[in-house]
Image (cartoon, rainbow, N blue to C red):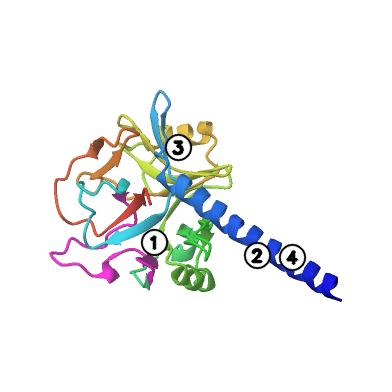
Amino acid sequence: MKKTLYRTLAVILLAAIIAVIGRSLNKDESTMQSNRSMLVDTTQQLIIYDITDFPLDLACGQMPDTANENVVFCAAAAFTGKCLDYFDHTNILGQHISNGVLYEGYTEDKDGIPFAERYALFVWQGIDSLGRMLPKGFHSIPNNLLLEKTTLKKGMAFTQHRVIKDGEVFSPCIQPLERSEHFRSICHKGDRYMVIANKDEMPYSEYLDLLLAYGVENALYMDMGSGWNHSFYRDADNQLHIIHPKTHSYPTNWLVVYKH
């Protein structure tokens, strides 16, 4: 009887030790992952910022300070409706989650096409109880259940126009195909999530072709244009790089990528 009791206690103790080690390994893995330098890759015409392994947020109302060394990437995300001298969440396109709080932004139907057919959500579902990062992904709207779960896990989300869907250029396009500009999109390729921009101005049609050639499967637009494109990142040596300079103060929201 005593031997059986001792064996039972030994099994329980061993299970507890394994659980503690498992939690420790998960925590270490999460810490190592989040402290990793963001991979910045280039092709001849594109620059690619890999944000897969990093915690995210949507900063609203105030762009993070470039002096904040915990921020490794920051760029405008959803569209701003009007150029206002004050901030209001209703001036941000669509539903969005900032600092774990869900807000309702403005919606618009264009050319007789319903809002939900043009736009989609980019969602990072936050961190679980063991400190592990939950999935990132693109989702059709409305998707209230997913957004509710994301707020509970202190994740983030924003709404934007589709660029590529299931490996094909999405129609209608957000930009005239002949328009030459710097463009930026949040993209999905395999198991990776990236922000991809063109290095030099080019027609939108050429930018789309480059994304497809790179293997992008899904992509959403990110707010661009002079002033709206103000953005920065930190390299592996923690050096700050301004991607586009600030020219006005009307942007309302920014995708922020953190070290930890």
- Measured in 3D between alpha carbons, the distance from the residue under mark 2 to the one under mark 4, in whole angstroms, is 10 Å
Counting residues from the start of the chain, the first of labels 4 and 3 encountered is 4
Q: Is residue 113 left or right of residue 5?
A: left
Which residue ends up furthest to the bottom in the rendered image?
A: 1
Q: Position of residue 36 (x, y in %)?
A: 42, 41
Q: SS for tag 2?
A: helix
Mark 4–mark 1 Cα distance, whole angstroms, equals 67 Å
x and y, in percent, of residue 49 in the image: 40, 39
Mark nearer the N terminus (3 vs 2): 2
Looking at the image, is mark 4 or mark 3 nearer the viewer? 4
Please say if the residues under marks 2 and 4 sit with CB atoms less than 8 Å apart. Answer: no
Q: Residues within 10 Å of mark 4 (few under 14, many from 20)?
A: few
Q: Are marks 4 and 3 in contact (CB under 8 Å)?
A: no
Whether residue 85 is in magenta: the answer is yes
Between the residue at mark 1 and the residue at mark 2, the CA separation in whole angstroms equals 58 Å
Classify 10 Å Cα crowding around label 3: few (below 14), some (14-19), many (20 and above).
some
The residue stretch that appears in magenta: 73-101
Residue type at mark 4 is: Ala
Please tell me which residue lies in front, 184 or 21.
Answer: 21
**Closer to the camera in the image, 33 or 45:** 33
* Residue 14: x %, y % from top left: 70, 61
Whether the residues at callouts 4 and 1 have beta carbons within 8 Å, the answer is: no
Classify 46 as above or below 29.
above
Q: Nearer the viewer, mark 1 or mark 2?
A: 2
Please, what is the three-letter code of the amino acid marked with disc 2?
Ala
Q: Residue under circle 1?
A: 110
Residue tagged 2: 16
Q: What is the crowding at mark 1: few (fewer than 14 residues within 10 Å), some, or many (at least 20)? A: few
Residue at 37% across / 71% down in the picture?
Answer: 101
Tell me if residue 189 comes above or below residue 86 in the rendering.
Answer: above
